[in-house]
Amino acid sequence: MDRDTRDMLLETASRFFAERAGKDIVNGVEKGVWPADLWREIEEMGLPLIAVPEEQDGVGGTLADLMALLRVAGEYAVPVPVAETALANLLVAAAGGKPAGGPSTVALGELSLQGNRVSGKVARVPFAGVAERFVAIVTAGGKSTLVVVPRDAVAIEDAPSHAGEPYGTVTFDGATPEFSGASPVSAGRALELAALARAMQMAGAADKVLVTATEYCKQRVQFGRPISTFQAIQHMLAELASYVAATIASAESASRDADEGGLEKGGSFSIAAAKTQCSDFAHRIAALSHQSMGAMGFTHEHILHHYTRRLWVWRRDFGSETFWGEKIGESFARAGKDELWPALSESRYAA
Amino acid sequence: MSIPKLEFPPFHLPAEAEALRGEVRAFLKETLPNIQSEDRFASWNTPSPEFSRALGAKGWLGITWPKQYGGAERSFLDRLVVTEELLGNSAPAGSHWVADRQSGPLLLKFGTEQQRQAILPRIVRGECYFSIGMSEPDSGSDLASVRTRAEPVPGGFRVNGTKVWTSGAHRNHYCITLVRTSGQHGDRHKGLSQLLVDLKTPGVTIRPIINLAGRHDWNEVTFSDAFIPEDCLIGNEGDGWLQVTSELAFERSGPERFMQNVYVLRELVRVLGRQPSKRANAILGRLIARLWTLRQMSTAVAGMMQGGKSPAIEASLVKDLGTIYQQDLPEIARTLAESDATTEDDLADFLDVAQYASMMAPSYTIQGGTTQVLRGIVARGLGLR
């Protein structure tokens, strides 16, 4: 979509999330309350279909449009699977399927196909507890097959994330998909796209953490003055801003590169680097924001933990800094020292 | 009260800049092996007049300046690419560095026509080098407190005072010196001016200040009744503060703020061998990802500047993060090499390299605006002060 349309969509989504995905909704999800109205409205706005082509009844946005939306969703800790469903729908559409309604998720892990039946186990599947279907990409004989498996065809073991979202382990035991098709997106690529989605959500959450901590320090009075007037606090928040800036910049660059290089391979290295960076700094962002807000920010009452706990969970989702860092390190070591700068300056793996 | 949103819009360097990158890379590959350098791993503070002249001959110094002064009138993004390649390939860029980066642009902006004509073409040829005379024994981060006094006398100024940390004054030609031309010490920003000082002027004494690594980069420059002709005043008398702050803002977020010791990373790759352990790969990958991020941030800031914005907060954040990265790098690399270097010889060699880098590292967060000054700027941007 063009720039103006995207900006309008993002602004609408931002206002909508602010109004409808507030503190009570986020806390409710943690207690196991599914916000059916919120999800219905998200579907009415077409958000889960944002990157599905118009001829497949989608909104016709680009990958970059989807990622920009996810940054906004991260900024509000939207506790429903917007990222997972939008990504699942995008993958299904790319494999020639028709995205169905309802919350979906992606089950990215080692799975096998025998005939038409899917087997294997995937741990920490986000929103497994509420997803109506699971989208997976199975690799066999050098070919990638996308499968859509309905909820009643799998066994789900609930394992809520540390942010209280309904994650779980999904076991496919000869499950029959409701759709399968040749996927132009490989399993490895699907993981990259999911990692990019998380990086963008982390950018949104990091931004919110900075704003929250900064506003708090301007209002909190101690020793007769707002604590934001103390140089120690000012420098702490400035340092926090530097980590937030790195998070935003890396995620946005990866999103641009992924979009420009196309769904099947764009921005491979940039995504790995961005997810490494975002995951690497999540701890510092959490530590400094909590330090600046004292005991208040450590309570369940305050919203800061909606964001810091998600940063801690998301840094692990779809590959941590160790996972992606290892891929980068392996490639650059294999290529040798003289390839370091050329590869880095071209945002590509060295070998 | 809303907080400004931090934005780093991804920016692609234009095709002509990338084409130039290829040319610069090829030139460096051919030229660098033949250049004598005092450092095994050179950077922007390693001097080499020979190299600077070779670069000048290619037309890559003063690359953005008007043709009438020998410049190429190319975009500042072209200049960014040249800078990246010099740093990425550890070229000894120290002789021309300040002249090309800071002093030339200052003269272009504020200098007299005579000053420009006399000096800029020599900088472009890689023959004329500059120092910066800002800091004094009692005036570091608090630059407005300078005491060096230039007393107006017939035909010029009589200058008395002392400048310190003056890099390269013992080998450079000129020093753009911040002095008080009127008013009192307590007047702060008022009454300051900048003078173009020929470092061979009688009454100017240059003494080395050796740094902790035993290197002679810095100097103490003392003025004892030194006569500086009036045509060496840069800009207007009394506008020194305005000029100097615009000078400080030049490219705070440039690649020199995170690529100064990139050789440590390159050498780390070498000593880890072609197939490091999983753990070593992960640590190496994290270092590479941080460097990549800094480059994306720096490029984004360049893009914003190209678009006519002045992203002061974003630029300060790049320097803050970048200089701390340069301090972390040798430490992380050192401990990783200790556990994972492929041979004992490689390790011993690398530990020397890393130790040297660690010794130089304290300077990164001091020069060009300390971390604390930068964080003050960011805090102001966040509306905290």
Image: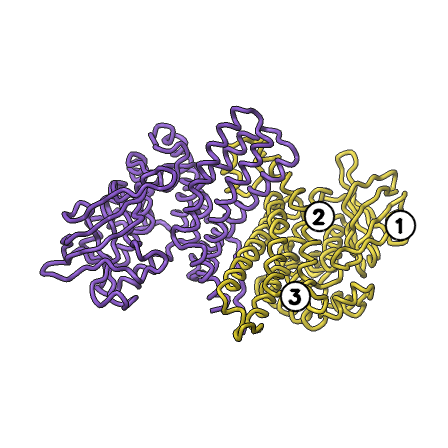
Chain colours: A yellow, B purple
Q: Say left or right for A273 vs B56.
A: right
- Other residues around mark 2 within 10 Å, as few (<14) / some (14–19) / many (≥20): many
Q: Position of residue B147 (x, y in %)?
A: 25, 60
Discs 3 and 1 carry the same chain letter: yes
Residue holding disc 1? A155
Bin the neighbour count of mark 3 within 10 Å (Cα to Cα): few under 14, some 14-19, many 20 and up. Answer: few
Residue under pointer 3: A295
Q: Nearer the viewer, residue B348 or B106?
A: B348
Instruction: Name which residue type carries label 2.
Output: Phe
**Numbered disc in front, either 3 or 2:** 3
Q: Which mark is residue A318?
A: 2
Mark closest to the chain's N terminus, 3 or 1: 1
Secondary element at tag 2:
loop
Closer to the chain start, of discs 2 and 1, is 1
Locate residue B215, reporting x and y percent. 34, 38
Looking at the image, residue A26 sits to the left or right of residue B352; the answer is right
What kind of residue is marked 1? Ala
Among the two numbered marks 3 and 2 on one chain, the one whose residue lies closer to the N terminus: 3
Under mark 3, the amino acid is Ala
The answer for which chain carries disc 1 is: A
**Marks 3 and 2, how far apart in space?**
32 Å
Measure the C-alpha gap from mark 3 to mark 1. Answer: 41 Å
